[in-house]
Image (cartoon, rainbow, N blue to C red):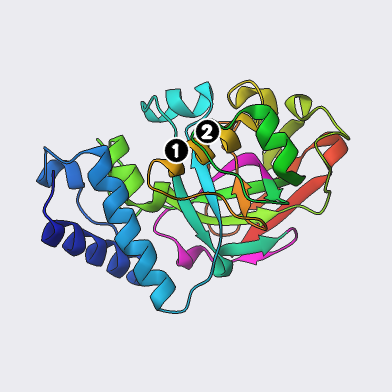
Amino acid sequence: MLSPDDIAAIADELAEADRTHGVIPRITARYPGATVEDSYAIQGVWRDRMIASGRRLVGRKIGLTSKAMQQATGITEPDYGVMFDDTIYGSGAEIATERFSNVRVEVELAFALARPLAGPDCTLDDALDAIDYAVPALEILNSHIELEGRTIVDTIADNAAYGAMVLGTERRRPDEIDLRWVPALLSRNGEIEETGVAAGVLGHPATGVAWLANKVSQHGARLEAGELILAGSFTRPMWVSRGDEVRCDYGPMGVIACRFV
């Protein structure tokens, strides 16, 4: 495992890469013995420094919960990161491409919690009972670590490659709609690039919320009331560039649109 000094130094590198929109060499290329526990420790130091600088934590993201994403990345287990208030956009937003080192978009559902949710034995039913509402969301991926050869260790340390989130406006309680069958048609500049259905996320998108509650309980934490949980993509990531118009049609849960400028 990495030393506390190594963990702090890597967290500093990632903070600087975030500030300058740069990319650093793979952690696993420089520290071949780095473990998943090391990567969450790096993420934790980075997170605490962001909070100390004045950023406000509003939720968490779960990644790599679908076969589509696991096949796209070669990584076979979910991961998680944190989301801050200055990374949330509404549908219709113009998003500055220069904020990111590289830009990809994923189709997801987000869940707002009505009350705390704690592991280690949280089930899907427990998660559904704690959820206030579901809302469609696009995740903007952003990597501060070189992409080629990246492993789960690199990804987790880099806040699970989270960049930002675009939220829709249609909110539904879990008892109002069968969340497994929420569809998505993801378009770039008017052409459909990806399609999917929310059951691609662990069979039910809220299963990821239960998984996360159990995972963070291993570190003595729980999911808090009011947090937004981004549950994982049910399409492959779509690359976007400056000038691209992105639109995702979620059927009964409305449409999200944004433009990268």
Query: Could you tell me residue 8's position as x and y percent?
Result: 20, 63
At label 1, the amino acid type is Lys
Q: Toward which corner of the image does residue 17 lie, by quadrant?
A: bottom left
Asked if the stretch drawn in magenta spans residue 109, the answer is yes
Count of all numbered marks drawn on residues in the image:
2
Residue 243 or 25: which is nearer the viewer? 25
Which residue is located at x 14 percent, y 42 percent? Answer: 29
Query: Could you tell me residue 220's position as x and y percent?
Result: 41, 49
Which residue is located at x 44 percent, y 44 percent? Answer: 216
Q: Is residue 79 above or below residue 146?
A: above
Query: Could you tell me residue 7's position as x and y percent?
Result: 19, 57
Which residue is located at x 24 percent, y 67 percent? Answer: 12
Evaluate whether residue 21 shows in this view. no
Q: Toward which corner of the image does residue 5 lie, by quadrant?
A: bottom left
Left or right, residue 142 beside residue 68: left
Query: Could you tell me residue 187's position as x and y percent?
Result: 69, 40
Query: Would you name the residue on which mark 2 appears?
Result: 211
Boundaries of the magenta span = 91-110
Which part of the image, by quadrant, shows the C terminus? bottom right
Left or right, residue 235 beside residue 77: right
At label 2, the amino acid type is Trp
Q: Secondary structure at mark 1?
A: helix
Query: Would you name the residue on which mark 1 appears?
Result: 215
**Is mark 2 in CB contact (under 8 Å) with mark 1?**
yes
Residue 140 or 102: which is nearer the viewer? 140
Q: Is residue 140 above or below residue 63?
A: below
Instruction: Estimate how packed mark 2 is, as few (under 14), some (14 to 19) or many (20 or more) residues with alpha carbons within 10 Å.
Output: many
